[in-house]
Image (spheres, rainbow, N blue to C red):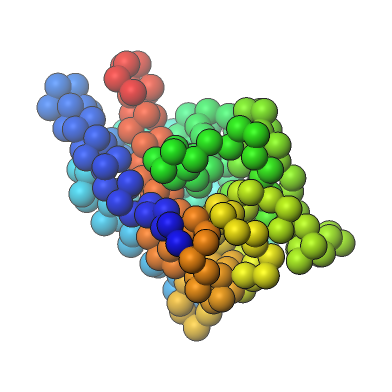
Amino acid sequence: MKILNGAELASFVKVRQLKQVRNLRQSKKIIPKLSVVYVDSGNKVIDTYINLKKAYANDILVEFSVYKENTDTIIERLNTLSRDDSIHGIIVQLPLPGDLDTDQILSHINPNKDVDGLSGGNFTPATPMAINWLLSGYGIDLSGKNVAIVGRGKLVGAPLTRLWKESGYNVDVFEKGDGYDLHIEIPKYDVIVTATGATGLIKSSMLKSGAVVIDAGTASEKGIIKGDLYDDVRERKDLIITPDKGGVGPLTVAALFDNTILAAYRQAKLNGM
């Protein structure tokens, strides 16, 4: 088994980002600032994600602020932050409570500050960027390969599909409940990215020898973050695979801050990225 170690790659990205932020602070007197807005729904996994971002921001000297809102105040907060020239990046920590329209909420983020890349084309979405970094970091070229993306979600599946099809890659997309038998379909593919949040969806019997398997799914089981891969997948020795921890996640956080730094450069009308 070959492990695609996203945490190791993220550490190299972090060194480069720290240099960029120091340059902004020292030479341009600009402090990159990222604001995270969320609605407290009792989901402890949200706290975990926010704390990971906070720790990363501290490591690269980005100013980080968190705003806990309710369903009545979140839009007002986003509008205020969008107008604040000192704020370079804004994200809404998902998921939102079910009674809120996620697309409608995200539309209140200034597109020039939407560093998650979810409301338009100003930034590459963070998780697809992370997956591209992971593949390039290990010299995996998708040209000529059959690629499957499992899941059409806003965070991963939909934007990744768009990016890869625009690049000319041979990509097919599957979704839970769309009528396909994944046991029959998935063994046909050389590269599989799964991002459904359905724990244990992808099993060893679905994967051919030598397949590249990237687990970008997240779900919470008793407060523990789980991916889409069934346990037996990690027993295989003939796969190229992301680890249970330290795969896509650390690079997604790094990509988010890459976009934040880029936003700071853009807002200051500087070159350097």
Above-or-below relation of 56 to 217 = above
Q: Which residue is drawn at 56% across and 70% down?
A: 233
Quarter assignment of residue 257:
top left
Q: Is residue 272 visible from the viewing direction of this image? A: yes
Q: Which residue is drawn at 19% across and 22% down?
A: 28
Q: Nearer the viewer, residue 17 or 95?
A: 17
* Lateral position of residue 122 relative to residue 208, left or right: left
Q: Which of 239 and 183 is in front in this view?
A: 239
Residue found farthest to the bottom: 222
Q: Which of 116 and 252 is in front in this view?
A: 252
Q: Is residue 95 visible from the viewing direction of this image? A: no
* Lateral position of residue 205 relative to residue 254, left or right: right
Total numbered circles = 0
Q: Position of residue 204 (x, y in %)?
A: 62, 70
Q: Where is residue 30 in the image (x, y as percent from the top left)?
A: 22, 28
Residue found farthest to the right: 179
Q: Which residue is drawn at 54% across and 76% down?
A: 231
Q: Where is residue 70 in the image (x, y as percent from the top left)?
A: 52, 63
Q: Residue at x 62, y 28 (%)?
A: 167
Look at the image and tell me in which quarter the C terminus lies. top left
* Lateral position of residue 147 relative to residue 88, left or right: right
Look at the image and tell me in which quarter the N terminus lies. bottom left
Above-or-below relation of 93 to 9 = below
Above-or-below relation of 225 to 53 = below
Q: Where is residue 170 in the image (x, y as percent from the top left)?
A: 70, 37
Above-or-below relation of 115 to 267 = below
Quarter assignment of residue 118:
top right
